[in-house]
Structure formats: structure tokens, C-alpha cells
């Protein structure tokens, strides 16, 4: 599971204010996860592994919130959720 929290215009240009957009992904297969991470990195995203595929259900509400903020509340399609870690 990947890219469901990202609006389509950001897939073609995954940078906002000079920073790569976070692309959350989940999966059970270690090799497949490594492939997805590499694809996301090559496409210009900041990949964030969300754990096993069972965690994909947590990405759905995040996608719903993004849709509400983008379309329901006027944020547009060039917004995306992100995850930040302390240095």
C-alpha cells in the first residue's frame, strides 16, 4: 500500500516548499518494501514505512483527512501529510 495519502498533482512533482512530500507505505514482504522504498525515493518522495500491511487501515483515515483539508476546506491538491522526527 502506497501513495493513497498523496494527491495526484504531487505524484508528478512531489516537492512542497523545497522539501520532498512524505509517501507512507505498508507491506508484509521485505523485498517488496525495499523495492517500493527505492521507487518512491527515485520519484522524489520521502518514503515513510508504516509497518506491515495490516497497518494500511491507519493510512485510510489519514487519506480521508487530507481529502477533507484539500477539497472540503479549500486547501487544494498541493498539500500532503508528513511525519517529522526529532534530530
Image (tube, rainbow, N blue to C red):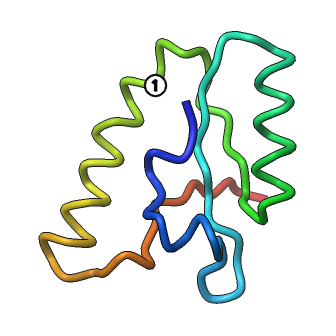
Residue 6, compared with residue 70, is above or below; it is above
* Horizontal and vertical percent position of residue 66: 31, 59
Q: Residue at x 60, y 15 (%)?
A: 52
* Horizontal and vertical percent position of residue 55: 47, 20
Farthest-out residue, bottom:
17
Work out whether residue 87 or residue 38 is closer to the camera in this orientation and state it.
38
Which quarter of the figure has residue 77? bottom left
Work out whether residue 72 or residue 39 is closer to the camera in this orientation and state it.
39
Mark 1 is surrounded, within 10 Å at the Cα level, by few (under 14), some (14 to 19) or many (20 or more) other residues, namely some
| Quadrant of the frame with the C terminus | bottom right
Query: In the displayed structure, does residue 87 sit left or right of residue 58?
Result: right
For disc 1, the marked residue is 56
Q: Residue at x 48, y 58 (%)?
A: 6
| Quadrant of the frame with the N terminus | top right
Which quarter of the figure has residue 46? bottom right
Residue 84, compared with residue 24, is above or below; it is below
Query: In the displayed structure, does residue 6 sit left or right of residue 11?
Result: left
Amino acid at each position: 500500500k502506497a501513495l493513497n495519502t498523496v494527491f495526484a498533482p504531487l505524484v508528478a512533482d512531489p516537492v512542497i516548499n523545497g522539501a520532498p512530500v512524505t509517501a507512507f507505505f505498508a507491506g508484509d514482504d521485505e523485498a517488496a518494501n525495499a523495492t517500493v522504498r527505492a521507487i518512491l525515493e527515485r520519484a522524489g518522495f520521502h518514503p515513510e514505512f508504516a509497518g506491515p500491511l495490516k497497518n494500511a487501515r491507519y493510512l485510510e483515515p489519514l487519506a480521508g483527512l487530507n481529502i477533507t483539508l484539500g477539497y472540503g476546506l479549500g486547501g487544494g491538491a498541493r498539500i500532503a501529510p508528513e511525519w517529522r522526527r526529532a534530530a
